[in-house]
């Protein structure tokens, strides 16, 4: 990195981390951007559409990748993680470990290696909803545009055939993990979130085929998803005629997540539009405790609730069970003060946001709230951006990331 300029470390290359890195770099700072996955974009890039404009996130991310390509002050390390960190008087000394690069920078994404591959694995980008080749481009718009290789899934003979199919010498079957050490003036934590696990929601049918999470529906609706963009029942591949959205699935619950994740109501309202766009005759019901669509996002609520065949029912779903090829929901109908039963072909659980850094014990993450969200520690030159700090939507995360970059630059300047 360049001499005489503050160097920042950004952990996580979702929308918040990428924004923070670019904002800091465009002020003249040097930035090391570290991402565990082999591509940038985080959870946002797995969404079908943003709200309220209902446009694909690839548009916004493409602008950001072009900014990254043009800015030599940002060093991007994918398939990497911060494995050690300690204060060094002027900031932090951090060690970054990068997974073995079985596919290196010579890769042109031509696809010859995939043609030679017969082994399939669960697709991590599509949340395990389908199978993909063991060597592949992670997703259609992946950046860096480089193939990844699940080497452990492939036998030696097949691996040699795959490597032999690459005319660019981009496959290194003997690749090893590498480490690098950086001295940085400040750290921006943008480690994002993960969805609350379905297997912890057995009462809500988390173990049933036709009960999915909101993150799964984003992939089903996406043209790059496991069904080519068709919303289908996982059990039989048929279009659903009755879809139920269950809000606060594990959220605002002392037995699961005690907090509200902030965006779940809006996400379900958006996804109800996905269903109605594909299946105008479908019956869509959203069961909620409270409808939370703050500010201008109220427009999403008004638009969705006005659609024919969409009902919003104030009621808490207590149990979901399989019955005769469909799903039975037991619901406390609050407004009518009674327990009702309802049926659906497909149930979408609005599972909450769990901070990814919640269980991380690196020294950088020692200041957390009771729910595992990371807190700013300006005295130690650590700032936090996006959902690592609190549940919020994409627009809020972008604004938050700009602020985190500014705070980090100030903290780094004080220690220079």
Image: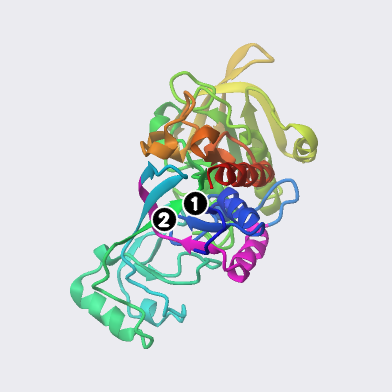
SS label for mark 2: strand
Q: Which residue is mark 1?
A: 9
Q: Residue at x 52, y 64 (%)?
A: 2
Question: Does residue 142 appear in the picture of this structure?
Answer: yes
Which x, y percent locates residue 234? 46, 49
Q: Nearer the viewer, residue 196 or 273?
A: 196
Q: Which residue is at a point 62% across and 37% down the rendered structure image?
A: 392
Distance from label 1 to label 2 (Cα)?
9 Å
* Residue at numbered disc 2: 182
Q: Seen in the image, is 173 located left or right of residue 290? A: left
The image quarter containing residue 245 is: top right
Residue drawn 29% across and 80% down? 163
Q: Is residue 69 magenta?
A: yes
> Taking 45 as reference, is 49 left or right?
right
Q: Which residues are magenta?
A: 56-84
Tell whether label 2 touches label 1 (CB within 8 Å): yes
Q: Residues within 10 Å of mark 2 (few under 14, many from 20)?
A: some
**Vertical relation: 380 (above or below) 127:** above
């Amino acid at each position: 990195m360049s001499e005489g300029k503050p160097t920042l470390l950004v952990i996580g290359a979702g929308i918040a981390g990428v924004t923070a890195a670019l904002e800091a770099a465009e002020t003249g700072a040097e930035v090391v951007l570290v991402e565990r996955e082999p591509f940038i974009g985080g959870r946002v890039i797995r969404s079908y559409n943003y709200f309220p404009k209902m446009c694909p996130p690839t548009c916004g991310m493409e602008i950001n990748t072009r900014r990254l390509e043009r800015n030599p002050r940002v060093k991007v390390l994918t398939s990497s993680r911060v494995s050690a960190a300690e204060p060094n008087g002027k900031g932090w000394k951090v060690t970054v470990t990068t997974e073995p690069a079985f596919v290196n920078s010579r890769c042109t994404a031509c696809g010859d290696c995939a043609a030679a591959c017969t082994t399939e694995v669960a697709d991590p980008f599509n949340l395990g909803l389908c199978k993909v080749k063991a060597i592949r481009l992670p997703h259609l718009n992946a950046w860096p545009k480089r193939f990844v290789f699940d080497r452990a899934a492939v036998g030696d003979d097949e691996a040699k055939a795959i490597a032999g199919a690459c005319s660019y010498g981009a496959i290194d079957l003997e690749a090893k993990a590498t480490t690098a050490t950086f001295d940085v003036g400040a750290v921006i934590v943008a480690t994002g979130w993960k969805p609350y696990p379905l297997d912890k929601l057995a009462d809500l049918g988390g173990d049933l085929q036709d009960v999915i999470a909101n993150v799964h529906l984003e992939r089903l609706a996406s043209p790059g998803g496991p069904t080519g963009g068709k919303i289908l029942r996982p059990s039989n591949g048929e279009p659903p005629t009755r879809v139920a959205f269950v809000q606060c699935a594990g959220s605002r619950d002392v037995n699961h997540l005690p907090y509200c994740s902030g965006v779940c109501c809006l996400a379900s309202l958006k996804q109800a539009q996905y269903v109605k766009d594909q299946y105008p005759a479908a019956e869509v019901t959203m069961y909620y405790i409270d409808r939370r669509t703050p500010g201008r996002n109220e427009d999403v609520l008004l638009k969705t609730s006005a659609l024919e065949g969409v009902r919003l029912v104030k009621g808490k779903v207590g149990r979901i069970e399989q019955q005769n090829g469909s799903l039975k929901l037991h619901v406390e109908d609050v407004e009518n003060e009674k327990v009702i039963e309802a049926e659906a072909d497909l149930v979408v659980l609005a599972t909450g946001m769990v901070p990814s850094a919640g269980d991380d014990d690196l020294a950088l993450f020692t200041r957390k709230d009771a729910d595992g969200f990371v807190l700013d520690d300006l005295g130690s030159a650590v700032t936090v951006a996006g959902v690592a700090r609190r549940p919020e939507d994409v627009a809020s995360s972008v604004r938050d990331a700009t602020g985190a970059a500014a705070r980090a630059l100030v903290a780094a300047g004080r220690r220079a």
